[in-house]
Amino acid sequence: MRRSRQDDFTLQGLPPINRRAQCRLTRRRTEQMASLDWTVRALSVDDGPKVWKLIRDAETLDLNSPYTYLMLGKFFAQTCMIAERDDQIAGFVSGFFLPESADTLFIWQIAVQPSQRGNRLGTRLLNALWTAASDRRPVSYLAATVTPNNAASAALFRRFAKARGAKCAVEPCFPLQSFPGLDHEPEYLYRIGPLGECRRPADQ
């Protein structure tokens, strides 16, 4: 008796209607495993030069002076993290608590090495930083500014909010005229929360 294509899928435990979802799940698991190859830890002052090179090579963020990243490693290590393997840095996230809103964690920069993009390493870094910060004090909101052309960061923050059932409000922050010269886009403020006590694993 000849089996139909429908029978083949049923025997394999993969009904046709679910094959696309199964492919998405497989791809996500592959991305998660790739991100787990890297160790995520707090930033140190010795990481400063490597982080500066990472931001330079990423070409998606404003490159600050090497002193900036040394200072982050020295005075803001509790709210900055890197992803490394074999003494190589593939990802970086920096943040700080807003002085006027102590329960808001502001994400300043998040960057992933070009060769590692698409592996959800940025998601893992953001989750790790939020978890570590929440262990020290209550974090009700997460905030960041994003330029209109930075679709990857916008998607990252919206995904972070959706995973926690939190709102993601977007409003103008720094208009174009705030920046000297003509080579900088306006910045929009993303504010996610309230976050409460919800937590998600680093490999969401």
Image (cartoon, rainbow, N blue to C red):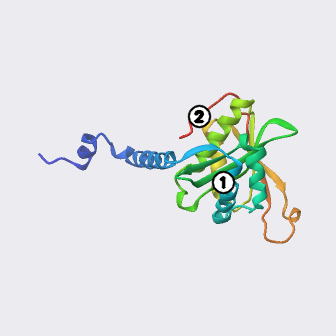
Q: Quick check: 7 left or right of 129?
A: left
**What residue do we see at 67% from left, 49% from top?**
93
Which of the two labelled residues, at mark 1 and mark 2, occupies the earlier sequence position? 1
**Residue 144 in sight:** no
Q: Mark 1 points at which residue?
A: 153
**What residue do we see at 59% from left, 49% from top?**
83
* Amino acid carrying mark 2 in the image: Arg
Q: Is 83 in front, or is 102?
A: 83
Dot 2 alpha-carbon crowd within 10 angstroms: few under 14, some 14 to 19, many 20 or more: few
Dot 1 alpha-carbon crowd within 10 angstroms: few under 14, some 14 to 19, many 20 or more: many
* Amino acid carrying mark 1 in the image: Ser
Quadrant location of residue 18?
top left
Q: Which mark is residue 200?
A: 2
Looking at the picture, how far across and down is residue 40, in whole percent? Answer: 59, 44
Q: Is 160 in front, or is 12?
A: 160
> Is the residue 26 above or below the residue 150 in the image?
above
From the image, which quarter does the N terminus lie in?
A: top left
What element does badge 1 sit on? Answer: helix
Residue furthest bottom in the image: 182
Q: Distance between the residues labelled 1 and 2?
A: 19 Å
